Amino acid sequence: MITRAQISVRFTGGDLAATVARKERLASRHFDAFLGSATVNLNLGLDAANWAYPDDAPVEFVIITPPQFVTALAPFVEWKTSCGYRVTIATTDVIGPTTTAIKSYIMGLYNGATPPVYILMIGDSPALLVTYTNSGGGSGGTDLPYVQMDADLYPDMIIAAGRWTTSTSWSPCGTRSWSTSSRRPATRRG
């Protein structure tokens, strides 16, 4: 039985400058707090690069919804904006109603200058907003693949408060998720 060991790992062909630049673009205290407990060396190399989260970068919050719910979302959007979030509403009549179209839209945001931290999906599946993957056997499914931007199993954004389900008429005031994240963001994505 080994009781003590020292292991060294050497990466060849890596590009620390490119890694740091990508980390800076995708950085979020919100997301890193979410992922940090499950990840080893989450900020590897950033301390050495003398990098810190910028305090004034916005926290991007994207809502994907069928168009008929935009008016009902207005108070929620106003509230999140007043809490310091930069809220974008993307409607399925503009970005497309299919899993491919929605994933493509989210991927475009992720690859942009200020990727979102939070994605909020509005509407039941499959009629109003399709679930990415159906669960085996029963009803329901998962939206996780919408926020997986690379080949690993980890999400690269947070699906905010899950999915707000609704059929044809809806008011966010009656939704449990309305008050789930009532605090102002501690810092913003940079």
Image (spheres, rainbow, N blue to C red):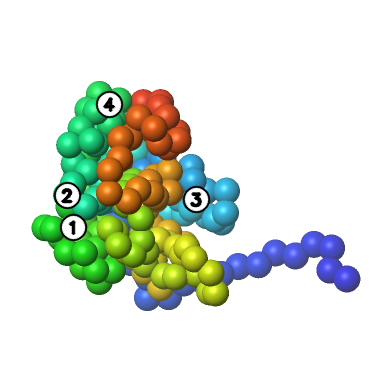
Closer to the observer: label 2 or label 4?
2
Closer to the observer: label 1 or label 4?
1
Give the secondary structure at mark 1.
helix
Any part of residue 70 in sight: yes
Amino acid type at image mark 4:
Trp
Q: Residues within 10 Å of mark 1 (few under 14, many from 20)?
A: some
* Nearest to N terminus: mark 1 or mark 3: 3
Residue furthest right in the image: 1
> Mark 2 — residue?
67
Q: Toward which corner of the image does residue 187 lie, by quadrant? A: top left
* Nearest to N terminus: mark 2 or mark 1: 2
- Alpha carbon separation for disc pair 2 and 1: 7 Å
> Mark 4 — residue?
79
Q: Are marks 2 and 1 in contact (CB under 8 Å)?
A: yes
- Placement of the C terminus among the 4 image quadrants: top left
Amino acid type at image mark 1:
Thr
Q: Are marks 1 and 4 in contact (CB under 8 Å)?
A: no
> Mark 1 — residue?
92
Q: Kindly identify the residue that appears in the image at 23 percent across and 36 percent down.
A: 72
